[in-house]
Amino acid sequence: MEEHARIKGVDLLGCGDFTHPKWNADIKQQLKEDDKGILWSNTGYPFLWQTEISLMYSQGGKGRRVHNLIFSPNGEVSHQIIEALGKKGRLDYDGRPIFGFSCIELIEMMRSISDKIEIIPAHCLTPWFGLFGSKSGFDSIKECFQEKTKFVHAVETGMSADPPMMWRLKEDINVVSFSDAHSYHTDKLGRECTIFDMKELSYESFLKSVRTGDGLDSTIETYPEYGKYHYDGHRLCGVSLSPKESLKLKGICPKCKKPLTIGVEYRIEELAKEPIGYKPEGAKPFIRILPLLEVIAIVLGKGLKTKTVSEVYNKFVKGRTEFDVLLRLGRDELIKLCDNEKLVDVILTSREGNLKLKPGYDGVYGKIIYNNEVSVEEPATVVENEQKSLSEY
């Protein structure tokens, strides 16, 4: 994780599922905690105590499935979290543990341990496991957490959503973005991340940033169309539909006649209190990019793990980070590194926020449209985003 984070240009990671017994043992063996709640590797890379859990329960007469991130201030509190959750179910599931209690109970449990524990709903708009998900989520944060809403300070966008989508919901909450990486490779690690402006590297500084927004500088996002649940559709039927098209079909697949998996774009239109383009006062800036490995693979028409793609990627990141390539280097510098104008065009177009994509749907990632080489029934929606000056990165 550290090796690939350094290649990517990520300066701070969550340690991953510290509730898993074997992983927890590795954390304690390989990382040392300082007096500010930061875990350090023996080569000086920092981690936060962090895990993710899945809650599956009934509330309001409907089955709910919500993923939540949990951040802990130190090892002692993390141990207490493990003890408390261990009484509710198994902790040794790969990926994340699953429990049958509500988000409200989670808040109560965590606050009974420490008021320094932070809970952030993860990938909040994905259909199956997001707080606002079309399949098993809620229509608002308050509906989910009820009287405990005041203890929820931020939501995580996930790959299928971005800040402009969240702004339209008019939820008074901070927006963060993380990569939800179940792999250490750079195409997953850091594909989405939050830029913090903290005076010191400490858990307290992190906590203050998330809770108040002071220190939350900006986010780096993938294009929401690239996410696996942007449009409505059926993967097995090969059906991908815009919200307008699926509305005409009343949410029923034209092939198998079963209900479609409703994507994030449709769900936003259901929940939005403001039109496209709405921006609240004090909204944080962001930038959209796609992981370099995936851009190379798509442009070259090769597999992500092929030797050809790896060789081009390694030329790009030799002596620099992936974020240097994606965010900082000019056209001439990029051409020198790869001698492929099409690839450079896609990198720069992505950086400028003007990349067009065939939207992902029902578990299928979106695809880049370059010079109309990928056909799509209607153009992918590209919402204008506020770009930061690249010199600020």
Image (cartoon, rainbow, N blue to C red):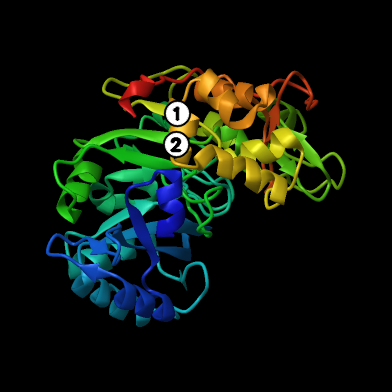
Q: What SS does tag 2 mark?
A: helix
Split into 4 quadrants, where in the image is the C terminus? top left
Q: Nearer the viewer, residue 300 or 111?
A: 300
Q: Mark number for residue 35?
A: none
Residue ID for mark 1:
327
Distance, label 1 to label 2, CA atoms, is 6 Å
Task: Locate residue 374, reporting x and y percent.
Answer: 78, 27
Q: Residues within 10 Å of mark 2 (few under 14, many from 20)?
A: some
Q: Quadrant for residue 196, please give it.
A: top left
Split into 4 quadrants, where in the image is the N terminus? bottom left
Task: Locate residue 146, reporting x and y percent.
Answer: 31, 51
The amino acid beneath tag 1 is Leu
Q: Tell me whether the residue at label 1 lies in contact with that at label 2, contact meaning CB atoms closer than 8 angstroms.
A: yes
Task: Locate residue 370, reporting x and y percent.
Answer: 71, 23
Q: Please give left or right for residue 53 compared with residue 31 in the image.
A: right
* Residue for point 58% across, 48% down: 127
* Residue for point 34% across, 22% down: 391
* Residue for point 28% across, 73% down: 81
Residue ID for mark 2:
323
Q: Nearer the viewer, residue 388 or 359?
A: 388
* Residue for point 52% across, 36% down: 222
